[in-house]
């Protein structure tokens, strides 16, 4: 950590940094975007070991955060905690979590000759590139949030990814600290197999068990022997208190008692994000008072339970990009008294081109409640059809409005939202960026 680099490496790094910063300036000056990926892509061509050379300079080490859901929110919470203690932190805050995005984020905090003067780097990483970046980064902490089905056209099933994670993480130095989700069977087993120091996080709140296992469940079989797991209760998807009656594999013990901790934002999934960040912060030596104060005053990242006021009305954006995440955002909506919801379904590269996952979402619960459901996006008619098939009785109490034009869909949804209620918008990733641009007039990426 914080190692010096050789002169020849310094010269190549300085050239790469100069070019990257010039590209960033041009892209932003011409208002072509936020330059969150391109600078890193170009700099990498000049210095292929860019990620390694930058990571070496981080004084107290890199914290790498991976998982299907919750990376951006967990990263922002941990960053905020560390900054409250006076630490300087590099962070890919835009959510650009592939290799070029990681490099761009670290380049942004270097000076003109490539010196990176930060105490920590917090990098949220796409679950599929973990095998590529662990060796050059050599992280101090690896935080494993969860593994759900996400973009099947790109990644495949969760067991494939978990096997890759286990193989590559086990090769890291023994002083590396790994923090997996105890309630996720695949990650719980991963932690039990590693030689490094492992700290688990998870829930101890039986009162929050679901009444039944949802359709969007990925892994209810033992990852060790393949037998069906016995669940005492499920919190979301396959996360819960489990035991294998055949081989004895069971849920690992979390470091923290979740019932003693408050949480950020809304939704049980954000309790997981809170516990993950808190466990990492405590391991880094941050006092509990600072952590709790940060949790109580946390502001949402863009699109992740972010709340805005538009034309005097409240709007809450809940990113919904896969079955598990969407089921949880639907749970947030149905637990409120608000009756207007806007779905925006896109099928672009950041979203995953396969939208068949919407049939694994429990939209029936939202339709049963009634209210106004507005749908838009590239695959607006797929979403509308899913909602129509969610009607259990022909005379359902819900009103469905189909609007291809996103700007008009937002306007229509706002019109149907009473002044004393909140409009919930459930978009996929690229749709979330478009929604925010319409609402705020600013691009994110």
Image (cartoon, helix red, strand yellow):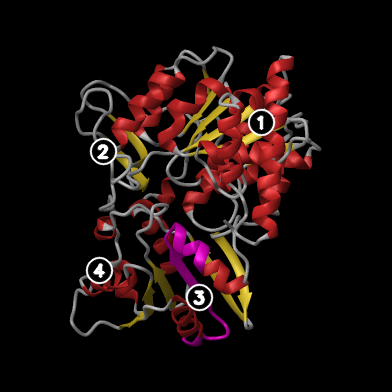
The residue located at (72%, 22%) in the rendering is 10
Residue 386: assigned label: 4
Q: In front of the other: label 2 or label 4?
A: 4
Give the residues drawn in magenta, as a range.
415-434
Q: Which residue is mark 3?
A: 423
Residue 47: assigned label: none
User: Is-magenta flag for residue 134?
Assistant: no
Q: Which residue is mark 2?
A: 220
Tell me the quarter of the picture where residue 234 sits.
top left
Q: Which residue is mark 1?
A: 282
**Label 3 CA crowd tier, 10 Å (few <14, some 14–19, many 20+):** many
Q: Earlier in the sequence, mark 2 or mark 4?
A: 2
> Mark 1 touching mark 2, by CB under 8 A?
no
* Secondary element at image label 2: loop
Whether residue 5 is visible here, answered yes or no, is no
Location of residue 99 in the rendering, given as x and y in whole percent from the top left corner: 52, 36
- In this image, 262 relative to 114: left or right? left
């Amino acid at each position: 950590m914080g190692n010096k680099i050789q002169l020849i490496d310094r010269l190549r790094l300085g050239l790469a940094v100069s070019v990257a910063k010039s590209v960033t300036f041009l892209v932003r000056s011409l208002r072509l975007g936020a330059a969150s990926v391109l600078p890193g892509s170009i700099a990498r061509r000049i210095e292929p070991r860019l990620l390694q050379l930058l990571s070496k300079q981080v004084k107290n080490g890199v914290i790498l955060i991976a998982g299907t859901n919750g990376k951006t929110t967990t990263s922002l919470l941990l960053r905020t905690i560390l900054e409250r203690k006076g630490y300087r932190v590099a962070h890919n805050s835009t959510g650009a979590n592939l290799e070029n995005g990681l490099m761009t984020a670290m380049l942004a905090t270097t000076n003109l000759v490539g010196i990176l003067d930060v105490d920590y780097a917090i990098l949220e990483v796409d679950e599929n590139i973990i095998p590529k970046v662990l060796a050059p980064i050599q992280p101090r902490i690896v935080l494993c949030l969860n593994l759900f089905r996400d973009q099947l056209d790109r990644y495949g099933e969760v067991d494939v990814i978990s096997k890759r994670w286990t193989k590559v993480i086990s090769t890291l130095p023994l002083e590396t600290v790994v923090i997996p989700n105890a309630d996720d069977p695949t990650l719980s087993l991963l932690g039990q197999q590693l030689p490094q120091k492992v700290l688990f996080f998870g829930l101890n709140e039986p009162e929050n068990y679901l009444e039944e296992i949802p359709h969007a469940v990925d892994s209810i079989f033992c990852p060790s022997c393949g037998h069906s797991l016995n669940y005492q209760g499920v919190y979301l998807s396959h996360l819960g208190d489990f035991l294998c009656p055949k081989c004895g594999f069971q849920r690992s013990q979390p470091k923290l008692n979740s019932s003693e901790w408050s949480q950020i934002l809304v939704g049980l999934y954000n309790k997981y994000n809170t516990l993950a960040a808190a466990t990492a912060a405590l391991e880094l030596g941050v006092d509990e008072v600072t952590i709790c104060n940060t949790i109580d005053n946390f502001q949402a990242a863009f699109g992740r339970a972010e709340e805005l006021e538009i034309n005097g009305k409240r709007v809450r954006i809940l990113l919904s990009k896969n079955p598990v995440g969407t089921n949880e955002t639907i749970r947030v909506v149905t637990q409120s008294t608000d009756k207007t919801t806007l779905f925006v379904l896109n099928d672009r590269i950041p979203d995953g081109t396969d939208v068949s996952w919407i049939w694994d979402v429990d939209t029936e619960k939202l339709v049963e409640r009634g209210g106004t459901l507005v749908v838009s996006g590239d695959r607006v008619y797929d979403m509308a059809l899913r909602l129509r098939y969610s009607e259990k009785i022909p005379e359902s109490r819900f009103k469905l409005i189909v609007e291809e034009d996103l700007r008009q869909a937002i306007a229509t949804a706002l019109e149907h939202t009473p002044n004393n209620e909140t409009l919930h918008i459930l978009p996929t990733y690229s749709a979330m960026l478009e929604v925010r641009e319409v609402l705020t007039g600013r691009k994110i990426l």
